[in-house]
Every structure is written in structure tokens, then in C-alpha cells.
């Protein structure tokens, strides 16, 4: 048997058992996980995960326990397991090792996730065919996580679900625009257990869509695009508003027009909300969290955000790209060169996780 297949089978069984244990007694299972991280401290993610678990154990009234219970009661356990393995193992463990090795050879940083802005009306730029090619290239470099920010509604979803199915060992964060989804599309989302579908919290069809997904025990989340710090002037009201969607996943994304100063202030606000643990959902600071994970994986906060016109939104580059470009060209032209920093002195390109 292929050693990778054996490892995957073992991880599958372990994760399945831990999910069942957590459904019965989340606090006891979290204590077991805490003991695990105390014993095996070599993981790059050990410190942040240890900190999260430590805060949970220190607060018996934490709303995060309710968040975990709601997730395990309302969502198919197989969906939780498959998305968790794709992200935790394929991307952050096995994929991270390949990313670090590829960085050593290439001499420039490689992000752990690619972000695509997708406009279905533009067929000659960032279309599904080009995304598929980029994803194939990315997998070879150890990148197994992708975000698709869909800009306008689209009536025919068949091809994008083919993309998800074709790359079943990757994780997709799919940000959908305001659109009433047909039952067949809701069923497809439920079946794609490597996809987290995310809906705009401010739009008219969101509550209807997520309610029907909840009936199907599907994974879903919501997102909010903010333009300035003023969006959060009534922060507690916003947080209470998100409760009605009954999801543990709330993503905050700055609009391209949002100033760096306001983004910094919103990030500080998000950190404060996370620390208080008074809401039954976890707020993701989209770009900042992506950067923090990349820092843990490779010692760099780089990420790649590709606009629907094929140009890089981040990092900025003067390189001209065409719709048939390959990922390696984007990376070579835009990613910062790797350099040893004080925190990389003991960096092992193939650590044990």
C-alpha cells in the first residue's frame, strides 16, 4: 500500500473518532487535545492552537463551546471531517512541507492559498479553465487551499462544481454574490465536502439560502465586506445580528477602497471580540489570518490575490499577464525573494508535524 494512502486512512479514522468524541463531550475532548499539543510541540501551529485551547479551558462560559455543539449537531460529520482533513493535513501539514521545499528551490516565497476574483461574464481572463490550470500547478507546489470570490450571479453552476470535484483533495472557500440558489445547487453544495460556501450577510437571499443548507446539514458561512471602521460603530448590534445565520464561520473582508488605517483598527476590534468569546461563532480576519498562517508555514506573510481581469491585486507588480499565463510566472514575477531572518535560523525545510 502507498504510505501516503496509509497515512491518509489513519488520519481519516482518527479525525472521525475525535469528532464523535467532541459531539458527546466537547470540554473533555478539548482537554485531550491540549494534552496532545503539550506532548508534541514541534508543529508550527502548536503555539496558536495551544493558545486557543488554553483560552477555551479557562472560560467555562465560553460561547465557543456552544459554537462547537451547534456545528456538530447541525452539520454532517463527514463534511466536517473531509474539509478539516483537506485544510489541516493536505494544506497545512503535507502541503506546507512541499511549499517550504519548493521555496528553497525557487528562491522566492510561495503562499499557502490562492485567491481568485471570478466574474463569470469575463470569459477570456480568470475563467474556470484558467483556474483549473492554476490549481494543478499549485498542487505541485504544495498549495491545496483556494478562495474564489465570485463577483456577479451565475445561472449555470455545473462547471464550477466539476472544478470542485476534480480537485477533491483541495479546500475551496467560495464567496457567492446575492443570488437565490435552486434546490439542485443547494444539493450540490452539500455533496461538495471540500467546499465552504460563504454568503454575503447583508444581502436579501442569504437567510433563505443558508436556512435551506442547514436543513441539508451542509457546511456554510457568511461574510461581510467593510469599507471603513464606521461599519462597526454599533459593533455589538452587528455581532448579535450574525447569530441568526446559525453558523460558526463569519468572515470579515476589507473592500479594496478601505484604508490601511481602518483595516488595522478593524483587526484590533476582531481580536478583542475573539478574546471575549461571547458570541457562538468565530470571526475570521480574512487577509490578516491568511498572512498569519503563511507566516507560520514559511516565515513570510505573502499571499496572492488575482483580479478577475487577470492582473494581480496583491502583491503589486508591473508584470503584464495574459489569460493563458501559468502560475509559476505569476509567482516568479511578484513574490518576494526568500531570505533568512532571525526567526528562520533553525528553519528545517522538512519538519515533523
Image (cartoon, rainbow, N blue to C red):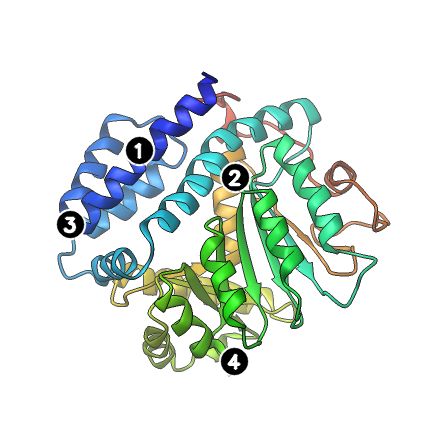
Where is mark 2, residue-wise?
169
Q: Which residue is mark 4?
A: 203
User: What's the CA distance linking mark 3 and mark 4?
Assistant: 36 Å
Q: Earlier in the sequence, mark 3 or mark 2?
A: 3
Query: x, y percentage for residue 268?
Result: 42, 63
User: In the rendered image, is residue 352 in sight?
Assistant: no
Q: Nearer the viewer, mark 4 or mark 1?
A: 1
Write the residue at 13% across / 57% down. Answer: 60
Alpha carbon of mark 3 to alpha carbon of mark 2: how far? Answer: 28 Å
Residue at 78 percent of width and 49 percent of height: 317
Mark 3 or 4: in front is 3
Residue under pointer 1: 13
Q: Along the polypeptide, which appears first: circle 3 or circle 4?
A: 3
Q: Residue at x 63, y 49 (%)?
A: 163
Q: Which mark is residue 24?
A: 3
Asked if residue 130 lies left or right of residue 208, the reply is: right
How far from the left and from the top, in percent, is residue 124?
A: 83, 58
Amino acid at each position: 500500500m502507498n504510505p501516503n494512502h496509509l497515512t491518509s486512512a489513519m488520519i481519516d479514522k482518527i479525525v472521525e473518532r475525535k469528532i464523535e468524541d467532541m459531539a458527546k463531550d466537547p470540554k473533555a475532548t478539548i482537554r485531550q487535545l491540549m494534552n496532545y499539543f503539550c506532548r508534541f510541540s514541534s508543529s508550527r501551529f502548536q503555539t496558536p492552537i495551544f493558545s486557543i485551547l488554553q483560552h477555551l479551558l479557562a472560560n467555562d462560559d465560553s460561547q465557543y463551546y456552544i459554537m462547537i455543539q451547534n456545528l456538530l449537531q447541525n452539520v454532517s460529520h463527514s463534511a466536517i471531517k473531509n474539509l478539516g482533513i483537506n485544510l489541516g493535513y493536505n494544506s497545512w501539514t503535507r502541503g506546507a512541507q512541499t511549499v517550504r521545499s519548493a521555496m528553497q528551490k525557487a528562491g522566492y516565497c510561495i503562499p499557502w492559498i490562492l485567491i481568485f476574483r471570478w466574474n463569470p461574464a469575463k470569459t477570456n481572463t480568470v475563467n474556470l479553465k484558467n483556474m483549473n490550470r492554476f490549481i494543478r500547478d499549485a498542487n505541485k507546489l504544495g498549495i491545496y487551499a483556494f478562495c474564489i470570490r465570485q463577483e456577479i450571479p451565475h445561472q449555470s453552476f455545473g462547471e464550477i462544481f466539476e472544478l470542485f470535484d476534480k480537485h477533491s483533495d483541495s479546500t475551496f472557500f467560495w464567496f457567492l454574490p446575492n443570488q437565490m440558489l435552486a434546490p439542485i445547487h443547494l444539493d450540490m453544495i452539500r455533496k461538495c465536502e471540500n467546499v465552504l460556501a460563504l454568503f454575503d450577510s447583508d444581502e436579501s437571499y442569504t437567510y433563505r439560502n443558508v436556512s435551506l443548507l442547514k436543513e441539508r446539514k451542509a457546511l456554510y458561512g457568511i461574510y461581510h465586506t467593510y469599507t471603513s471602521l464606521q461599519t462597526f460603530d454599533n459593533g455589538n448590534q452587528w455581532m448579535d445580528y450574525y447569530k441568526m445565520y446559525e453558523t460558526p464561520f463569519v468572515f470579515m473582508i476589507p473592500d479594496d477602497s478601505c484604508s490601511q488605517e481602518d483595516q488595522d483598527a478593524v483587526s484590533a476590534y476582531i481580536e478583542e471580540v475573539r478574546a471575549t468569546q461571547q458570541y457562538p461563532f468565530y470571526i475570521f480576519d480574512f487577509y490578516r489570518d491568511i498572512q498569519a498562517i503563511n507566516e507560520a508555514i514559511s516565515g513570510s506573510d505573502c499571499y496572492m490575490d488575482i483580479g478577475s481581469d487577470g492582473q494581480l491585486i496583491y502583491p503589486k507588480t508591473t508584470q503584464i499577464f495574459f489569460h493563458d499565463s501559468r502560475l509559476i510566472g505569476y509567482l516568479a514575477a511578484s513574490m518576494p525573494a526568500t531570505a533568512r531572518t532571525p526567526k528562520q535560523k533553525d528553519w528545517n525545510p522538512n519538519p515533523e508535524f
